[in-house]
């Protein structure tokens, strides 16, 4: 009987020692593993609530679209939990160009309008579908994917990620919005000099 009580005591203590959450301490630096934890005494319910996805993002830009994140930097309650969210606003003719999230898979649900979405597998197979209100699509981690407004009204989607810091790299910007020499871009993309320089001019690249 004493041994049983002792075992239950150890089990209780081990369970009590489990850390339920790690609200991000935004006053410190962010590492690849996220933020360090706030002291438990300073954690409040507001750390677990975020209202930033209520408002539409500003779509007055070159892509006529906006992504409003709820990552650990904006929503410290998701720090360390392996999840995050974002809001996607697409004006008529809006597009989220081909991009990848190196740190997370993505699930998208359309709540207004319609979105043409797709991704390309590592075998270069293409998966494209027009999504209407209520439809959900998953984009596997690290694969190139895109979203385009498929209706002449503002379209809205909410997305969830399997990481509080999913990362983002937009293909067009990676090629044409930095100082990568045009000669290298031409060699690696088979585009001619005039096209590369024109795209750099549109996206602000140099070189």
Image (cartoon, rainbow, N blue to C red):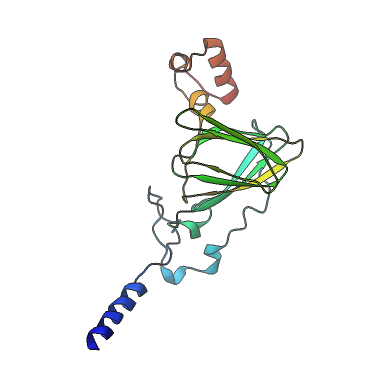
Along the horizontal axis of the image, is 142 left or right of 90?
left
**Residue at the image point whose x is 49% and y is 24% from the top:** 175
Classify residue 78 as left or right of residue 61: left
Write the residue at 56% across / 14% down.
195
Q: Residue at x 44, y 43 (%)?
A: 103
**Residue shown at 53% from the left, 16% from the top:** 196
Q: Residue furthest right?
A: 152
In which quadrant of the rendered view does residue 79 lie?
A: bottom left
**For residue 118, what is the image quadrant?**
top right
Residue 30 x, y percent position in the rendering: 41, 50
- Relative side of 177 to 130, left or right: left
Pick whichever, 36 or 158, lies toward us: 158
Look at the picture and state if 189 lies above or below 153.
Answer: above
Q: Quadrant of the N terminus?
A: bottom left
**Residue 126 locus on image (x, y percent):** 54, 30
Looking at the rendering, which quadrant does residue 96 occupy? top right
Q: Is residue 179 above or below residue 159?
A: above
Horizontal and vertical percent position of residue 68: 60, 46
- Left/right placement of residue 57 relative to residue 125 reads right
131 above or below 179? below
């Amino acid at each position: 009987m004493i041994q049983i009580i002792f075992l239950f005591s150890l089990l209780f203590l081990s369970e009590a020692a489990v850390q339920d959450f790690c609200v991000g301490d935004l006053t410190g630096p962010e590492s690849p593993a996220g933020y360090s934890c706030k002291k438990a005494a300073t954690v409040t319910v507001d750390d677990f609530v975020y209202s930033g996805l209520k408002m539409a993002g500003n779509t007055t830009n070159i892509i006529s679209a906006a992504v409003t994140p709820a990552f650990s930097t904006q929503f410290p309650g998701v720090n360390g939990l392996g999840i995050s969210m974002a809001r996607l606003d697409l004006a008529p003719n809006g597009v989220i160009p081909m991009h990848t999230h190196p740190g997370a898979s993505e699930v998208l649900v359309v709540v207004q309008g319609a979105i043409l979405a797709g991704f390309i597998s590592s075998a270069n197979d293409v998966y494209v579908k027009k999504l209407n209100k209520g439809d959900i699509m998953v984009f596997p981690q690290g694969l190139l994917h895109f979203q385009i407004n498929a209706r002449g009204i503002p379209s809205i989607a909410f997305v969830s990620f399997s990481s509080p810091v999913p990362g983002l790299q937009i293909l067009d910007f990676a090629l044409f919005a930095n100082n990568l020499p045009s000669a290298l871009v031409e060699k690696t993309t088979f585009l001619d000099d005039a096209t590369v320089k024109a795209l750099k001019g549109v996206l602000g690249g140099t070189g």
